[in-house]
Image (cartoon, helix red, strand yellow):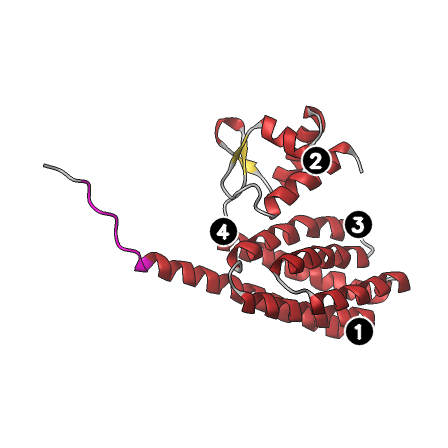
């Protein structure tokens, strides 16, 4: 892995895990410290991270971490759904026996993860494997930011919802099991079912936030004599 790729991976991981909070303005010195590289590879990584929507232009020509947005999440899912559907269909044809053995192990892991933290790790592995199984570099690369930023949204929106964690864990298993069986139709249907859940989960979170906001009392008027 090149230094710029390493910097990209480290910074994106900090964004995904919310070690860098949504909306945070980032200085060059902060980015260099996180990247663990010099200025040039860090800048190369930041250009790619901005292009891939991990970062956005901030004030004073700096960069900032994007806010959490339901509209952005739905837009990501709209694209990701089609790409992941294609990926699992290709996987049923192109995946090697060794790759399918990895899938079987991952299915076992997903069925046994005890909490959200462990699931987040397994989910990242699942996403990476889906891209790899397609044996299409362009497809795998396109999925990386879509999946990573979706994981960030999921982490924040379901932080205290054990039921959503359990349901999401179960929904990924059928598509992976179908890939192992090289059943393209079942893999496709399972991925589409999963994405229907992800869309509804995002909309439910938005409705909950809206109702909480409406329930809050209005700010007091400023005191005047």
Q: Badge 2, how many Cα within 10 Å: few under 14, some, many 20+?
A: many
Give whichever of 198, 29 is nearer the camera: 29
Q: Which mark is residue 7?
A: 2
User: Are the two marked residues, 4 and 1, in contact with CB atoms closer than 8 angstroms?
Assistant: no
In the rendered view, would you say 32 is above or below 134? above
Quadrant including the N terminus: top right
Residue tagged 3: 137
The residue segment tinted magenta is: 214-222
Give the residue at mark 1: 183
Please state the horizontal and vertical placement of residue 143, each as a whole percent of the image. 69, 52
Residue 154 is situated, as x and y percent measured from the top left of the image, at 57, 57
Instruction: Looking at the image, tell me whether mark 3 or mark 4 is earlier in sequence order.
Output: 4
Query: Nearer the viewer's eye, disc 2 or disc 4?
Result: 2
The residue lying at 51 percent from left, 38 percent from top is 24
Q: Which of the two discs, 2 and 3, labels the residue nearer the N terminus?
A: 2
Viewer-nearest of labels 2 and 1? 2
Determine whether the residue tagged by mark 2 lies in a helix, strand or loop: helix
* Residue highlighted by disc 4: 69
User: Main SS type for the magenta part?
Assistant: loop
Q: Residue at x 47, y 65 (%)?
A: 204
Tell me the quarter of the picture where residue 168 sits. bottom right
Dot 2 or dot 1, earlier in sequence = 2
- Tell me the SS state at disc 4: loop
Whether residue 17 is situated above or below residue 62 in the rendered picture: below
**Res. 43 image quadrant:** top right
Q: Is residue 30 magenta?
A: no
Instruction: For marks 2 and 1, give the CA distance.
Output: 38 Å
**Quick check: can you spot residue 192?**
no
Q: Determine contact: label 3, label 1, CB under 8 Å.
A: no
How packed mark 4 is, by other alpha carbons closer than 10 Å (few <14, some 14-19, many 20 or more), is: few
Residue 187 drawn above or below residue 29: below
Q: CA distance from mark 4 to mark 1?
A: 35 Å
């Amino acid at each position: 892995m090149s230094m710029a790729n390493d910097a990209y991976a480290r910074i994106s991981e900090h964004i995904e895990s919310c070690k860098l909070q949504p909306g945070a303005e980032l200085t060059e010195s902060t980015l260099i410290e996180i990247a663990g590289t010099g200025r040039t590879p860090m800048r190369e990584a930041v250009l790619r991270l901005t292009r891939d929507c991990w970062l956005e232009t901030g004030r004073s020509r700096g960069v900032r971490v994007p806010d959490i947005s339901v509209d952005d999440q739905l837009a990501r899912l709209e694209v990701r759904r089609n790409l992941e559907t294609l990926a699992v269909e290709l996987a049923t044809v192109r995946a090697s026996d060794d790759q399918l053995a990895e899938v079987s192990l991952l299915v076992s892991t997903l069925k046994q993860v005890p909490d959200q933290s462990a699931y987040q790790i397994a989910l990242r592995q699942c996403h990476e494997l889906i891209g790899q199984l397609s044996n299409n570099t362009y497809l795998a690369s396109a999925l990386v930011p879509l999946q990573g930023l979706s994981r960030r949204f999921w982490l924040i929106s379901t932080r205290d919802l054990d039921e959503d964690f359990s349901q999401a864990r179960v929904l990924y298993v059928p598509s992976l099991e179908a890939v192992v069986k090289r059943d393209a139709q079942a893999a496709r249907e399972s991925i589409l079912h999963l994405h229907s859940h992800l869309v509804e989960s995002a909309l439910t979170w938005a409705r909950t936030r809206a109702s909480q906001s409406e329930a809050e009392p209005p700010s007091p008027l400023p005191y005047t004599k």
